[in-house]
Image (cartoon, grey):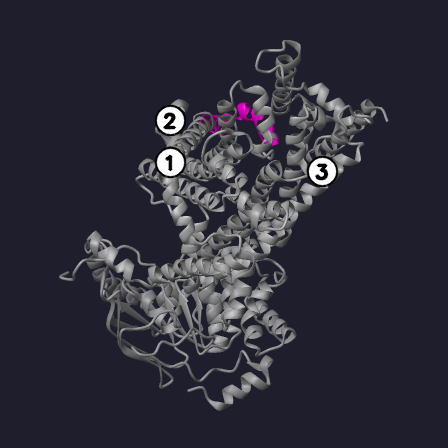
């Protein structure tokens, strides 16, 4: 399929989504759908956002291709990258049509997700226990603070040596970052719970098990989910570094490799793909959080009477 | 002591903790209680030789300047803190001594100042929490009981709402129901209506008194509001500024059920004048000592 | 009140003594001590997967040797300089950008969408672009470290401006403050806590990024040192590198925290 057609389809989908949002807004402001769309399109808000994009793309194209300025001229231009990305027969072998592209995406996603899940499964309970038991906290805090300052990426060489193979090493390093973030945020979450809730639960006859399940866990949830979002971002951050240093396949590897092979448009493709997937994974975590904490949503936006 | 008949009542016919049946226990005897925070360090003496007696089923209000130790006493009664001297007896059995600190429990439930309904549980889940967790009722029984009690205080159709969606008046009512469903011996309330406007407060008073008339529980009520204290209670006790002890006890001779019109009656006004004098003296002392809110 | 020193007013030596005797300190030390014991014992062959790890004593020796080489200290300097340049540049550009975006709606409309699209791209993904763009190796590494801290600080500052209670601004305006005065006297100071948080998170990220950048494309620095030890199969060297980086990271976090405390005398952080 012609890349221009694909481009057209993508644009059409985005426009449809935007139009749908306008319909909802139209209902809110009691305008007709058409009038609402017109209002948005001519509004200062939208025009400025559009201007921002256009200026950036124009700047990119002008400096890199049109005027070929000294520092800029080795970089690939925007149009070049776009066409390559959508081309059925890409010059460098990576586009939305090639299997290799998805292979790299899959590898990276698999690594990031595995590390993230592992970090969550270990970090949340650890954070809960640290917040819950003073003694445990005192034992473990010193150790955690000793290991934590070491940037996770500094573990890469050691991890490669100790763990069988590159794959576990990369996942391990990614896991480390996510783990520390999750544990710390969970700990903060437990500490943020108002003492009154504990007291109320104890009055009502809750034993330790119930306190943990009914007060600690739900009470720490908001912080836990903030931590999970951060840890997702941190996982991607480490993963890319790990892949660049020591892996075959994966988006980080792709970016570095295409640099060495002088396939520069692929670098940009890789970067943008990373950006999209990174954003999408955070969005997934965020929406899971919203569902689990329905009580919070309603509290913030719900129909509470005042007074 | 917890009479055997009461115990059977609780265990065998849980739904029949009949709202009309009056409880016969919940007598508190507080003798020379002292509480010192951080004896080796900062050494704050919150209570000194504090004594008071509460008969079973009595509604007692404690008033006094900020930081005088009212909340401290409540915390000790509830089991969140221990005392350093003196003793407390519940129905003649020792509840707290310097060597023993009882854990909090459903026979002395607390309603908190800023509200402690679990935000992540619905109203019905909150209210039924006590009985279900203790295993005293099945969930179905507890739900039914909760609905009865909620409608008694004028709350219908909110059982699936979250506390965050309710107004503060409604929240406080739910919290009181949550406490009472456990059939406590003593209900401890720590300035529950403090943050409310006058209108909501008035309505809340009605509901509390209705519940009190129906269940006859011993109530220990802390407040700053002198009118509220006189209107609600059988006895109003004035606590001195820190270190706190009970300086005066005022018996409220107004008949029950209390009517709002009584607020304008000459007896009420006379009692209030009396109380104002006693409290003001302590308040000035506290003010001069530069006390900060301890709550 | 004839009582002896209060908790907060106690002389420092007394507080130190109290702390060292406290359960907290003892338990923490026990845990750390236990960690070293297990390490020593495990690497002597008693734990199966640890045979490749050198014992703490070996590492200690290696550390001693390293500290006598000029190269080690040069690495410290190089890494620290890179971190400093990148971090400071990120603050100098990021704080105004964040404040501008938070304060001026039009500016935010213009720049925020682009910012949000670039943010999920991990800093290290920028390495090839950076190398292609910047003339020297040094500047390209500095750019990467800049990216790491930049997005963090902007996000934090933006959040900080958004969290300023409306009443503060209203109060200032009702006293007759001009927009410029409101900005400099109210908005800026109120955003300082967020700036400090952004700096503390940012410094951690910066170190991470510097180390990785050095491993991938650097020729000097602590990250490079560690990588070279890896290539040479010198495991103790790897651990020495890791510990040095950890210490460096810790010290810089402390430095940032001190700056934060100095900026916010009215608040104690953490």
SS label for mark 3: helix
Query: What percent of the width, then of the height, locates residue C55?
Result: 45, 54
Main SS, magenta region, reads: helix
Please tell me which of labels 2 and 1 falls first in the chain: 1
SS label for mark 1: loop
**Label annotation for residue C69:** 1
Q: In the rendered structure, which segment of residues is drawn in magenta?
A: C96-117
Query: What percent of the width, then of the height, locates residue A39?
Result: 68, 25
**Disc 2 target residue:** C184
**Disc 3 target residue:** A104
Mark 3 → mark 1, Cα distance in angstroms: 42 Å
Q: Quadrant of residue B158?
A: bottom right
> Which residue is at a point 75% across and 39% down the rendered structure image?
A103
> Which residue is at a point 58% across and 28% down the rendered structure image?
C127
Q: Residues within 10 Å of mark 2 (few under 14, many from 20)?
A: few
Mark 2 → mark 3, Cα distance in angstroms: 49 Å
Q: Is residue B192 magenta?
A: no
């Amino acid at each position: 399929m012609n890349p221009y057609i694909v481009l057209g389809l993508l644009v059409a989908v985005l426009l449809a989504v935007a139009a749908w949002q306008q319909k909802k807004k139209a209902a809110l402001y009691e305008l007709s759908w058409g009038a609402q769309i017109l209002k948005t399109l001519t509004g200062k808000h939208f025009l400025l956002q559009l201007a921002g994009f256009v200026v950036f793309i124009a700047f990119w194209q002008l400096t890199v291709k049109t005027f070929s300025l000294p520092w800029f001229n080795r970089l690939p231009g925007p149009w070049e990258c776009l066409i390559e990305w959508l081309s059925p027969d890409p010059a460098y072998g990576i586009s939305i049509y090639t299997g290799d592209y998805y292979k790299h995406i899959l590898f990276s996603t698999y690594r990031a997700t595995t590390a993230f899940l592992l970090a969550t499964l270990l970090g949340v309970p650890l954070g809960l226990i640290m917040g819950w038991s003073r003694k445990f906290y005192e034992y473990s805090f010193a150790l955690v603070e000793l290991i934590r300052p070491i940037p996770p990426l500094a573990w890469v060489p050691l991890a490669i040596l100790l763990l069988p193979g590159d794959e576990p090493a990369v996942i391990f390093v990614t896991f480390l970052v996510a783990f520390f973030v999750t544990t710390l945020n969970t700990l903060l979450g437990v500490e943020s719970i108002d003492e009154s809730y504990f007291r109320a639960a104890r009055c009502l006859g809750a034993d330790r098990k119930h306190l943990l399940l009914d007060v600690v866990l739900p009470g720490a949830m908001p912080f836990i989910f903030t931590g999970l979002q951060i840890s997702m971002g941190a996982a991607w951050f480490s993963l890319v570094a790990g892949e660049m240093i020591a892996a075959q396949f994966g988006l980080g590897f792709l970016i570095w490799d295409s640099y060495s092979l002088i396939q520069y448009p692929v670098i940009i493709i890789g970067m943008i793909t990373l950006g999209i997937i990174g954003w999408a994974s955070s969005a997934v975590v965020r929406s899971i959080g919203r569902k689990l904490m329905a009580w919070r949503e309603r509290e913030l936006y719900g129909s509470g009477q005042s007074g | 002591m917890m009479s055997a008949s009461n115990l059977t009542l609780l265990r065998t016919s849980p739904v029949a903790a009949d709202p009309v049946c009056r409880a016969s226990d919940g007598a508190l005897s507080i003798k020379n209680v002292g509480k010192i925070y951080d004896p080796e360090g900062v050494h704050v003496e919150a209570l000194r030789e504090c004594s008071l007696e509460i008969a079973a089923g009595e509604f007692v209000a404690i008033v006094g300047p900020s930081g005088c130790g009212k909340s401290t006493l409540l915390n000790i009664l509830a089991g969140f803190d221990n005392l350093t001297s003196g003793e407390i007896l519940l129905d003649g059995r020792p509840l707290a001594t310097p060597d023993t600190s009882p854990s909090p429990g459903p026979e002395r439930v607390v309603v908190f100042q800023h509200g402690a309904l679990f935000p992540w549980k619905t109203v019905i889940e909150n209210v039924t929490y006590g009985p279900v967790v203790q295993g005293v009722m099945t969930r179905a029984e507890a739900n039914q009981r909760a609905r009865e009690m909620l409608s008694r205080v004028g709350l219908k159709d909110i059982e699936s709402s979250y506390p965050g969606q309710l107004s503060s008046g409604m929240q406080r009512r739910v919290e009181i129901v949550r406490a009472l469903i456990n059939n406590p011996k003593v209900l401890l309330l720590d300035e529950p209506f403090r943050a409310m406007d006058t209108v909501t407060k008035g309505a809340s008073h009605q509901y509390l008194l209705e519940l009190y008339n129906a269940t006859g529980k011993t109530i220990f009520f802390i407040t700053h509001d002198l009118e509220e204290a006189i209107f609600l209670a059988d006895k109003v006790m004035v606590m001195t500024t820190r270190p706190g002890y009970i300086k005066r006890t005022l018996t409220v001779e107004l008949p029950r059920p209390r009517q709002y019109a009584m607020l304008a009656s000459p007896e009420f006004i006379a009692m209030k004048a009396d109380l104002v004098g006693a409290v003001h003296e302590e308040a000035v002392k506290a003010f001069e000592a530069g006390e900060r809110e301890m709550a | 009140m004839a009582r002896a020193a209060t908790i907060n007013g106690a002389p420092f030596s007394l507080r130190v003594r109290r702390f060292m005797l406290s359960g907290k300190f003892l338990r923490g030390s026990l845990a750390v001590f236990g960690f070293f014991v297990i390490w020593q014992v495990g690497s002597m062959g008693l734990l199966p997967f640890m045979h490749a790890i050198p014992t703490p004593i070996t590492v200690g020796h290696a550390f001693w040797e390293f500290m006598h080489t000029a190269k080690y200290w040069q690495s410290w300097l190089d890494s620290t300089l890179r971190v400093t340049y990148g971090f400071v540049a990120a603050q100098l550009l990021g704080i105004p950008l964040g404040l501008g975006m938070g304060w001026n709606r039009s500016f935010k409309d213009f720049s925020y969408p682009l910012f949000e699209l670039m943010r999920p791209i991990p800093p290290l993904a920028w390495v090839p672009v950076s190398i292609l763009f910047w003339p020297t190796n040094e500047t390209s590494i500095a750019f990467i470290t800049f990216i790491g801290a930049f997005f963090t600080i902007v996000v934090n500052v933006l959040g900080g401006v958004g969290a300023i209670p409306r009443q503060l601004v209203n109060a200032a305006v009702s006293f007759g403050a001009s927009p410029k005065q409101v900005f400099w006297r109210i908005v800026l100071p109120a955003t300082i806590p967020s700036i400090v948080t952004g700096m503390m998170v940012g410094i951690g990220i910066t170190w991470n990024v510097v180390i990785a950048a050095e491993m991938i494309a650097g020729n000097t620095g602590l990250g490079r040192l560690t990588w070279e030890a890896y290539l040479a199969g010198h495991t103790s060297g790897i651990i020495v590198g890791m510990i040095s980086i950890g210490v460096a990271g810790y010290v810089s976090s402390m430095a940032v925290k001190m700056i934060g405390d100095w900026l916010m005398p009215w608040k104690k952080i953490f």
